[in-house]
Amino acid sequence: MSVFICPLCSRPLYRRAESGGPPMGSFYCENSHCFDISSKGAVNLLGRRGHGDSREMLRSRRAFLEKGYYLPLAKALAAALAENIGEVLDAGCGEGYYSKYIDSAAREDVIIMLK
């Protein structure tokens, strides 16, 4: 059973590790839509590059997060998920602040998907 669906056709996405393909493999659907997993373990399901935030918004968010206000939440989330996950979808969460902590606490076979 797949927990993710193709953003193009709404069919289930399945993970495929290919020899000779991308280092981490890819996700694909029965209609041959394919989304490569980056070397960092991220998958872009948007079908386009970039984001909607301005540089000022990105700087402001980063400055706020670097002050550590959400650090206890990020660490608690990572600890809670460390042994109980296989794939994580980080959707609309900026630059992956929480995913960074989840990734550092997770098993090696966990894939963090960014959207």
Image: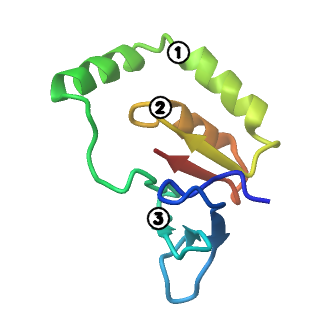
Q: Residue at x 66, y 60 (%)?
A: 12
Q: Secondary structure at mark 3?
A: loop
How far across and how far down the image is residue 113, in percent? 54, 50
* 66 left or right of 11 in image: left
Amino acid tagged 3: Ser
The residue at 75%/36% (across/down) is 81
**Secondary structure beneath disc 1?**
loop
* Amino acid type of the residue that numbered disc 2 sits on in the rendered structure: Tyr
Amino acid carrying label 1: it is Tyr
- Per the image, the residue denoted by label 3 is 39
Q: Is residue 71 above or below residue 107?
A: above
Q: Which sits earlier in the primary sequence, circle 2 or circle 1?
A: 1
Per the rendering, the mark at residue 86 is none
Of residues 40 and 27, the one nearer the viewer is 27
Q: Earlier in the sequence, mark 1 or mark 3?
A: 3
Q: Are marks 2 and 1 in contact (CB under 8 Å)?
A: yes
Say which of 87 and 65 sits in front. Answer: 87
Q: Residues within 10 Å of mark 2 (few under 14, many from 20)?
A: some
- Label of residue 70 in the image: 1
Q: Quadrant of residue 104?
A: top right
Read off the residue under disc 2: 97
The x and y percentages for residue 84 are 82, 42
Which of the two labelled residues, at mark 2 and mark 3, occupies the earlier sequence position? 3
Which of 107 and 14 lies nearest the eye of the viewer? 14
The vertical placement of 87 against 20, above or below, is above
Task: Report which quarter residue 5 is drawn in.
Answer: bottom right
Q: Is residue 46 above or below residue 63?
A: below
Residue drawn at x 49%, y 70% as measured from the top left: 33
